[in-house]
Amino acid sequence: MNIWYLLLASLAINAVFFVFAAILRTDVFTDITYSLSFAVLSVFLYVSLRPGSTTALATLAMVVLWAIRLGSYLFFRIMHIKVDHRFDDRRNSVVAFGSFWLLQAVSAWIIMLPVTGIVLADGRISEIPVTAFVPFVALFVAGLTLETVADAQKYSFKRRKENEHRFMSSGVWRFSRHPNYLGEIVVWWSLALPGAFVFTGLEWLYFLGPLHITLLLLFVSGIPLLEKSADKKWGGDEAYREYKAGTPLLVPNPFAKRVGT
């Protein structure tokens, strides 16, 4: 199977939902389509290649599990908040709004590259003992659990009216200012690392997947936007400045000063 077919599939999925989103001028479909893209690409890989190794099958299953978890959370969140303010300056422009959807489609394909590579290398990876992949499964579970707990805690925090103008610094957010993104990064590296057993030559480029999501969250659309927004909201709050100074941006520091609410 040509990996470019997966790019076309991702573009097609996002194009269909972009049309609905643009016509209705709604944010409801945006994030849910991101999760759906991964699930559909995983099914496409399975149907096209019919992998037989436990590792390849488990990798696809973990991607679908991750997509269901994230998609469910994002769906309930957008149903509650109604409007995603990230798109306030894009929603009424087909070009600006469409560029986001294009980036989303391409990103899903890039992030899925190591998973694609593992499935394509099904015959080679089946020769590796399944026990060798247990640590990566454990890492995946840890990452998925962390982002699930982080999202649930923040969602619950924001649902309480008394927290409307307060920042989140309790639960796992005491140890990292962006624990959900840490979990996300761990998930995609855990899915990619088994490829190190079988990738050769240019196949090592499949690791552009986890590298892409890591750089995207650290420097582009994830942490920088949220940090800027938080500084604008609470930059004058001494408690927030203490929290920011004493809490690592991403990776927890056991020696950092704890600030909770």
Image (cartoon, helix red, strand yellow):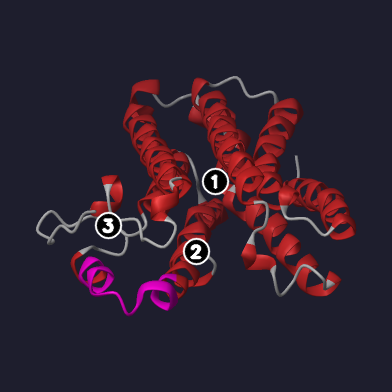
Q: Main secondary structure of the magenta part?
A: helix
Q: Nearer the viewer, mark 2 or mark 1?
A: 2
* Disc 3 element: loop
The first of marks 2 and 1 along the sequence is 1
- The picture places residue 150, in percent across and down from the top left corner, at 38, 44
- The picture places residue 192, in percent across and down from the top left corner, at 47, 44
Number of numbered markers: 3
* Label 1 CA crowd tier, 10 Å (few <14, some 14–19, many 20+): many
- Nearest the viewer among 65 and 259 is 259
Horizontal side of 225 relative to 1 (left or right) equals left
Relative height, residue 39 to residue 15 (above, below): above
- Nearest the viewer among 221 and 201 is 221
- The picture places residue 227, in percent across and down from the top left corner, at 41, 71
The question of residue 232 being in magenta is answered with yes
Residue under label 3: 251
* Disc 2 element: loop
Please, what is the three-letter code of the amino acid marked with disc 3? Val
Q: In whole angstroms, how far apart are the C-alphas of marks 1 and 3? A: 24 Å
Span highlighted in magenta in the image: 230-243
Residue under label 1: 114
